[in-house]
Image (cartoon, rainbow, N blue to C red):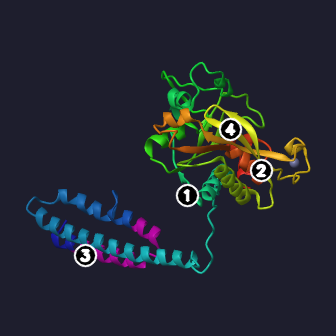
Amino acid sequence: MELQELRRDLERLRERALADFAAAPDLAALDALDVAYLGKKGELTVVLRGIGALPPEDRPQVGAVVNAVRSAIEAALVERRAILGTAALESRLGSEAVDVTTPGRRPPRGSRHPIVETAREISRIFGQFGFVDYEGPEVEDDLTNFQLLNIPPDHPARDLWDTLYVDIEGYLLRTHTSPGQIRVMHAERPPIRALLPGRCFRYEAIDASHQTEFFQVEGLMIDEGTTLGDLRGLLDQFAAAMFGRDKRTRFRPGYYPFTEPSVAFDVECVVCGGVGCPACSRTGWMTILGAGMVHPVVLQSGGLDPERYQGFAFGMGVERISNLRHAVNDLRYYLEDDLRFLEQF
Ligand SMILES: [Zn+2]
C-alpha cells in the first residue's frame, strides 16, 4: 500500500470516528462505536495489523500516524462519554427528584425495660434523701454473701437461699444484694447512704412468682444515732412517692440474720385500697420490702464499731414493685424478650 494513501485513509477514519461519536445518542451507542473502532476486530486495529506488511523503512512513519489517530479517537471517546454520562445523570436526577420538604420517616424508638425503669425510679426517690447508687459484683464470694452477713457455713438460715455455685471454690452467684452492704462499709466511712440495685440468682422452680434470675435494690444507711424511727420515716416517704400519699403503711416483725430487729414493710393494697382482694390474699396489705437495723456483727464485719454507729438496711424486689406499678401478674414476662409485652412500657 502506498504510504500517502494509508495516511489519508487514517485521517478519514479519524474524522468519521469523531463524527460518529458526536452523533451517538447515549452511552450504549457510544460503547458499540468503541468496539467498532478500537475493539479486537475494530477498524483501527485492522489497519494497525496491516503495518506488518509494509517495508521496514516505512513502518516508523506509519506507526507515528496510527498512534496519533488512535490518541485522537480515544480522547474524543472519553470526552463524549463524559458528556453523555452527565446527561444521563441529569435525566436520572430529574426523574428521581427528592422533595427535601417532605417530613422524614421516624425511626422506631425503643423504651426502657420496665425493670430498669422501676429501678431508676426507686433510685430517684431515695436519691432525694441523699442515697447514692453503688454497684456490687454478680459473682460473689461465700464470705461476703453469707459469713460476713452473720450467716456462718452451718447456719440453718442458709436454707432460705437456694444458691447457685460457680466452678471456683468459695464463689457463687449472689443470692441477694445484701453483700453490697459489706462492700460499701469497706469502701466508705459513715455517714453512709447507699443504694445497691442489681441482679440476683437463686436455684428456684420457675413459676409466676419465682425466677432463677431477679432484681433487688438494697439500701443502707449508717451514722451515729440512726434509729428504727428514721427507717420508718424514710420508707413512708418512699411509699408515698411510689404509690401515692393516701396509702397507709405498717411494720410487721420479720426475720433476717443480718438485721436486728427485722421488719416487713407493708403498704395498703393498691388494687383494693385495703378492703381485701385476691391480689393481697384478702389481707388489705401488700408487703413491699424487708428491712431492719443492721446487726452489730455485720457492722463489725464492715469494720465499724457498733458502740458508735448504728444503721438500717432494706431490700426490695424490683419485679414486685414493677408488678404493682404496672399491674403485671407474672414474673416470667420480664425476661422473655417478648415485644408484645415490652412495647407497653
Ligand atoms: Zn387487695
Tag shown at residue 324: 2
- The residue wearing badge 4 is 262
Marks 3/2 in contact by CB < 8 Å: the verdict is no
Mark 2 residue element: helix
Amino acid type indicated by mark 1 = Gly
Q: Residue at x 86, y 45 (%)?
A: 279
Residue count near mark 4 (Cα–Cα under 10 Å), binned few <14, some 14–19, many ≥20: many
Residue 345 at least partly seen: no
In the image, residue 43 above or below residue 213: below
- Tell me the CA gap for discs 3 and 1: 94 Å
In terms of sequence position, does the residue under pointer 3 or pointer 1 come before the other?
3
Q: Residue 105: where, in percent of width, then height?
A: 63, 69
Q: Which residues are magenta?
A: 8-33
Q: Quadrant of the N terminus?
A: bottom left
Disc 3 or 2, which lies upstream in sequence?
3
Identify the amino acid type marked 4: Ser
* Distance (Cα) linking label 2 and label 4: 23 Å
The residue tagged 1 is: 130
Name the amino acid type tagged 3. Glu
